[in-house]
Each structure stands twice: as structure tokens, then as C-alpha cells.
Image (cartoon, rainbow, N blue to C red):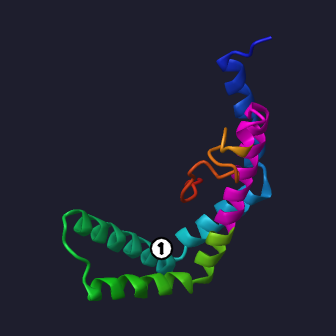
Amino acid sequence: MPVDTQQLLDEAEKLGKLVAQHPAIEKYKQAQRSIAEDPDASRSLAEFDRQLETLARQEQAGMPVTDAQRQTLESLQQRIASNIKVKALNMAQVEFMDLLRKITQTIHRPLADPAAQYAGGVGGSARGGNGGAGAGPKLA
């Protein structure tokens, strides 16, 4: 019997509620709160994002990135990477994204044509890529 869109959305909502209860999600939320409560970490991340955005706009305009700008960005990156709370956030984000990747692969499994599984069928690649997921979503 065919399944309608609403049934799929209802089941997706149930899955979302289950995922929200997974320990990886709470760990990720806690790591985000920890960063938000740390003025130095928050300031460093915001400054890094600003610098990165400025350099991207500059490159799009055809202007080269100077050595001083590159060194400033590298210095910020080192400061961020050495912050224990940022490290915890990165680890939690990896765990979170791995959970989402496993869920996505499991959803795709019954959809895949056996011949397509080896030729990069449903899911994007024969290796089981994460569907192009970039940085983790912001969880409240």
C-alpha cells in the first residue's frame, strides 16, 4: 500500500524526537552553551568568522590576501584550536554529524537499487557520504 507524504512527515517527526533524546545531541548542545558562556571563546570565534568573511569578499573582488591578513587569521585559528571548550565543541560536532550520517545511510538503504549501491546510487557516493553536510546545525 502506498504511503502518503503526511505519513512520512509524521514518522520523520517521531524520528526527530528520538534523535533529540540521543546523548550526542545533549553533548552538542552543552558544548554550544559552554562556548556561548565563555567570552574569550565566543569573541575569538566571532573574530575568526569576521576575518574569514572579509578575506572571502576580498578574494571575490579580485584582491589578493596579504601576508599580514593570513598571519592574523592563522593566529586566531591557533588561539581557537587551543581553547578546550572549542575542542569539546568540535568533538561533539563530529559525534553529532556521525549520528546523522548513520541515520541517513539507514534511511537510504531500502531505497537503493542493488546495482546503484556500487556505482554511487542513492546517498551520493559508493562510500556513503554524508550528503554534503557541512558545519553542524545550531541547536538551541
User: Residue 45 sits in which quadrant?
Assistant: bottom left
Magenta span: 92-117
Q: Residue at x 75, y 50 (%)?
A: 102
Q: Residue at x 57, y 53 (%)?
A: 133
Residue placed under numbered mark 1 in the picture = 42
- Return the x and y of residue 10 as percentages of the image width and height: 71, 25
Camera-side residue of 5 and 125: 125
Whether residue 106 sits left or right of residue 55 in the image: it is right
Judged by its main secondary structure, the magenta piece is helix
- Return the x and y of residue 101 as percentages of the image width and height: 70, 51
Please check the rendered image and state whether residue 93 is part of the magenta-colored stretch, yes or no. yes
Give the structural element (helix, strand or loop) at label 1.
helix
User: Residue 61 sits in which quadrant?
Assistant: bottom left
- Return the x and y of residue 136 as percentages of the image width and height: 58, 57
Quadrant of the rendering where the N terminus is positioned: top right
- Return the x and y of residue 39 as percentages of the image width and height: 48, 77
Camera-side residue of 60 and 51: 60
The correct choice, above or below, for 98 with respect to 41 in the image is: above
Judge the density around disc 1: few (<14), some (14-19), many (≥20) Cα neighbours within 10 Å: some
What amino acid is labelled 1 in the image?
Ser
Whether residue 29 sits left or right of residue 58 in the image: it is right
Camera-side residue of 135 and 19: 135
